[in-house]
Image: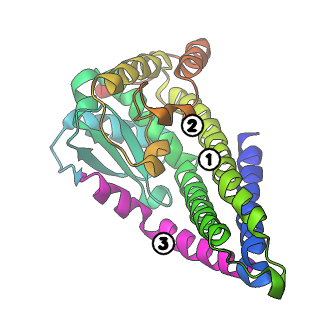
Amino acid sequence: MNAIKTFLLMAVLTILVIFIGQMMGGTSGMMMACMIAGVMNFVSYWFSDKIVLMMYKAREIKPGELPRVHRAVQYLVLQAKLPMPRLYVIDSPMPNAFATGRNPQHAAIAVTTGILDILDDKELAGVIAHELSHVKNRDILISTLAATAAGVIFMLARMAQFAAIFGGGSRDRDGGGSPLGMLMIAIVAPLAAMIIQMAISRSREYQADATGARMMGDSLSLANALRKLTLGVKQHPVEVNPTTAHMFIVSPFSGKSMMTLFSTHPPMEERIKRLEALAQEVNPYAAPKIIY
């Protein structure tokens, strides 16, 4: 069901891009919007992982370094039948983690130093299982494409705003929209794109929680980790690029931030509630003690 919902939401985002382009410049504007979206999707598909890791100054974890991370990942990739991802650490007090990469063969998992300070081995394994679930379900590519489409919409909306203010547009030549119509696009389109992106990200987070819990055989450790991470983010707020916020396991914005009004993450209380209910289905003793 989540896959169908995600496909439909991605289709709506694509149609929104085409519609905005058509309103701004008729047929030529629609074609230009499609070209821009195509170029951005190409760059995102091939280079998004490198861009994000560089953005947060992540460094690759060397063999023998941070053994508790290596132990958890090595066991869990066997459980999930996934190739070994590249592992990175980010020097940040904010406790968080994310996965990136275009497919399981080119995946990377990054953890902050803050998350290593506050989670025990079981909780850390639960977080890594969640991130590997994103890799297994190919959520990384979906969320990247959604973020790219939303970025195109934001850019086109800004162009529409300037066109409306300064009387631009090509409505007389090939059917472009009126200045009033472009001004409406500048206001409504970014909000619509943000809501759609939120819906995609939230549905994938629920699925990754459940898949990760079953992969590890323990849903309560991830639930406990989410509680600690939520509190840790509030205690150690760090400035984060809003376009990458959906990648983190918990929202990187503290409760005081206005960005929480448009959070790409589902309510933490609901995530924990679902994981606790799932405890009756998974075996907390299934995972060998080597990862603990």
Look at discs 3 and 1 and give the one toward the viewer.
1
> 251 and 209: which one is in front?
251
On screen, residue 35 above or below 133: below
On screen, residue 100 above or below 277: below
Q: Residue at x 55, y 76 (%)?
A: 39
State which quarter of the image contains the C terminus.
top left
In the figure, is residue 104 to the left or right of 278?
left
Question: Which of pointers 3 and 1 lies earlier in the amino acid sequence?
Answer: 3
Please tell me whether mark 2 sits on a helix, a strand or a loop: helix
In the current view of this chain or complex, which residue is farthest to the bottom? 173
Determine crowd level at label 2: few under 14, some 14-19, many 20+ residues with C-alpha closer than 10 A: few
In the figure, is residue 43 to the left or right of 31?
left
Please tell me whether mark 1 sits on a helix, a strand or a loop: helix
Residue at the spot of label 1: 194
Look at discs 2 and 3 and give the one toward the viewer.
2
Three-letter amino acid code of the residue under disc 1: Met
Residue at the spot of label 2: 262
Instruction: Give x and y (percent) for residue 61.
Output: 21, 49
Q: Residue at x 63, y 79 (%)?
A: 35
Q: Residue at x 41, y 16 (%)?
A: 224
Three-letter amino acid code of the residue under disc 3: Val
Span of residues in magenta: 30-58
Instruction: Give x and y (percent) for residue 80.
Output: 50, 41
Q: Could you tell me if the residues under marks 3 and 1 are in contact, i.e. CB atoms within 8 Å?
A: no
Confirm whether the magenta stretch covers residue 291.
Answer: no
Quarter-of-image position of residue 252:
top left
Determine crowd level at label 3: few under 14, some 14-19, many 20+ residues with C-alpha closer than 10 A: few
Instruction: Give x and y (percent) for residue 72.
Output: 33, 34
